[in-house]
Image (tube, helix red, strand yellow):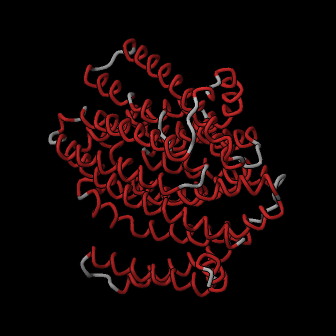
Amino acid sequence: MESSVTKRIAKNFSWMLAGNIASGLIMFLSIIYVARVLGAANFGLFQFVQAFLLYLVIIVDSGLSTYGIREIARNHERAGALSINIFALRLILATITYCLAILILLVVPMPIKLRQLFSLTFLLVFYRAINTDWVFQGLEKMKYVGLGKIIFAATTFILTVFLVKLPTDLLFVPLIQFIAGCLISLSFIIFLFKRILTFNLKQVSPSSWPATFLFAIPLGISTILLQIYDNLDTIMLGLMSQPSEVGYYNAAYRIFYLFAGVFSLWLATVLPVVCNKMAEDRDKTKLFMEKYLRLTLLIFIPLTLLVFLAAPLFIQIVFGQQYLQAIPALQWLIWALIPFVISNSYGSLILIPAGMFNLFLLSVGAGALANIVLNFLLIPKYGFIGAAIATIIAQAIAGMYAFHCSQKVLNLDLIRYLIKPLAIVLLAAGTFLLTHNLLAGQWQIMQLLVSNIISLGVASLLIVYLEYDFIYRFIKEIIRI
């Protein structure tokens, strides 16, 4: 990995990480506040509607953002014209999608309050249509992505605390998000075209829209299928179970998202670099990806175990005693993090940069099909535990297929990068069990806290001991010692 590339990745990831940690903490506080004020039933209802919104957002995007990132990363000179036309396409898709959704809401019988909640929540498709994150990612200007997330999170949190006081204030939550999102996105669009890119109405080319849409549509379909992993279980739980069970499951999912989100930031930072390298030299791309896999698996496999062990602490501290039933949901769900990392590493970072959109679609489709079947089989009998198991298996199937397809582009080994992380996991788990048994009879929270801290320390020391040279060289490349 060249020093300049490593340094650029580290800088962009630092911006993304700082922005997302700050915005994530604020949004997390907002979610906790909303969950506590609304109660499990209303919170579950809110999450149920949000699950449908994500599918509409994906339809509005239709893979255009991922396609835009790839094309801008490969040729920055096209960024202005490409972004203008993609914004126009997304706004048209948002208008059509929202109108169709409202027509369906008018036909489907439901309580008036639920119809209002759906209508206000679906307004967020317009905010997402004009979101600028993908442009800045393609340009590798991640600081603006992080800054935008912080401003949005802080604005929504402040407004939520001031306006949402009772369970009956449920409808204010999506309205706040819509207003804040649109105002912030418009501000960043103005900044983008005044300071970074040139704006020229002549660059608007409706004749190019069909071709752009057709290029992006496999990625859009893939994104829809990816959301099946995240949302189908929530929708099915909402249909088959009580709203409170949806609330418990989504409380666990919120914690899962914290850690999956860190990986997604890492992925978003690396994606434009891989796109650029893939267009220039595949041998260098292979060397880069080998280091990426080694570092990524070294961190996220032990992290999965540590979250599993600390699940009771996370749930009790974050959501309180009323969400204790979410503990087993998190303990199962967090294991989906490992196949999630592998699937996206071989799919998003190899198949997409190589332009193999259809193979990426097939890998995602295989996992989505498995998820649908398993949810139907497992949720009625096992509830949210069945939903978590379905997610783990579906991610594993998608990962295996992506790995198989990616070998046609880059022949990257996987087993060799799993051995050390798995050894760390076994030793850290053994340390936790030993410490936990030695502290038996102590205050439960203290027992869990001490056991988790010691196992975290053991895992960290093992990572440094086993990969000292690799970590040292990586840091050296960043700071140019």
Q: Quadrant of the N terminus?
A: bottom right
Find residue 250 and report its horizontal and vertical position in percent: 38, 47
Find residue 391 and report its horizontal and vertical position in percent: 54, 48
Horizontal side, residue 454 vs residue 390: left or right:
left
Find residue 434 and report its horizontal and vertical position in percent: 44, 84
Q: How many marks?
A: 0
Horizontal side, residue 256 vs residue 115: left or right:
right
Depicted 53 relative to depicted 279: above or below: above
Quadrant position of residue 318: bottom left
Residue that extends furthest to the left in the rendered view of this protein? 165
In the depicted view, which residue is nearer to us: 455 or 215?
Answer: 215
Residue at point 24% right, 78% down? 443
Q: Is residue 336 visible?
A: no
In the depicted view, which residue is nearer to us: 42 or 60?
Answer: 60
Horizontal side, residue 375 vs residue 182: left or right:
right
Q: Quadrant of the C terminus?
A: bottom right
Residue at point 56% right, 75% down? 425
Depicted 408 relative to depicted 307: above or below: above
Find residue 18 and report its horizontal and vertical position in percent: 43, 63
Residue at point 48% right, 56% down? 261
In the depicted view, which residue is nearer to us: 380 or 457?
Answer: 457
Horizontal side, residue 480 vs residue 444: left or right:
right
Q: Is residue 249 visible?
A: yes
Residue at point 61% right, 72% down? 298
